[in-house]
Amino acid sequence: MGNHDWWYNGARVKTALESVGIRNLENDVARIERNGDAMWIVGFGDLWEGSPDIAKSLAKITDNAPIVALTHNPDLFPQVPLGVTLTIAGHTHGGQVALPLIGRPIVPSRFGQLYAIGHITDGGKHLFVTPGIGTSILPVRFRVPPEISLLTIN
């Protein structure tokens, strides 16, 4: 869950998700198997409003299957160890506005535009930041269209 989920009413949002079968992976893991292949999904708590515990979460993994980490805020990425195959985040909304020649004037990240949107590689690690479909604070998007990202993992 992200900062706005917690600001609204974290317990209520969690209950609503779980009532329709969506499991909350707040510092937890799930092992997924398909056609004889397996992978781990690990969820880290929100950096701003949750209590992310990367080490505790990863300690729950019991084999060498690939690991996909989910976190709301991409600013957690530098702390994610190299053994995580892919980290997926949101939070930034892609900056919501991308001005020609200037870029994204406001990105809610201490790393500025570095983790604003898309596929980022850093030191052999991979991060994908989705711009999502909503907006934050101001209901405006310019040159950052809403997106439901579909990732194919091979």
Image (cartoon, helix red, strand yellow):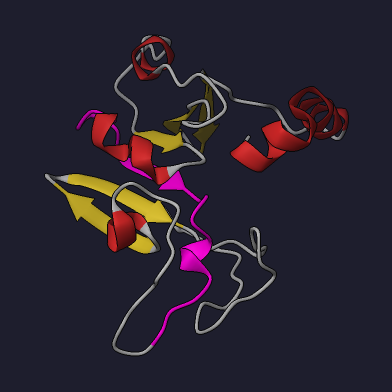
What residue sits 43% from the left and 32% below the top?
39
The location of residue 121, given as percent across then percent down, is: 21, 54
Can residue 121 be seen at all in this image of the molecule? yes
Reply above or below: 10 against 125: above
Looking at the image, residue 125 sits to the left or right of residue 154; the answer is: left
Instruction: Name the magenta segment's main secondary structure.
Output: loop
Occupied quadrant, residue 87: top left
> Can you see residue 154?
no
Residue 36 image position (x, y, % from top left):
46, 33
Residue 27 lies left or right of residue 20; in this view the side is: left
Image coordinates of residue 100 in percent, x first then y, are 36, 90
Count the marks. 0
| Residue 12 drawn above or below residue 119 | above
Residue farthest bottom in this picture: 100
Q: Nearer the viewer, residue 150 or 93?
A: 93
Q: Is residue 147 above or below residue 64?
A: below
Q: Position of residue 41 (x, y in %)?
A: 48, 31
Q: Is residue 11 magenta?
A: no
Residue visible at 70% across and 70% down in the picture: 139
Residue placed most toward the observer, 10 or 108: 108
Asked if 136 appears above or below 32 in the picture, the reply is below
Magenta residues span 80-99
Which quarter of the figure has residue 145?
A: bottom right
Left or right position of 79 against 15: left
Instruction: Please tell me whether residue 92 belongs to the stretch shown in magenta.
Output: yes
Residue drawn at (34%, 78%), measured in percent from left and top?
103
Rendered-image quadrant of the N terminus: top right
Q: Residue at x 53, y 61 (%)?
A: 93
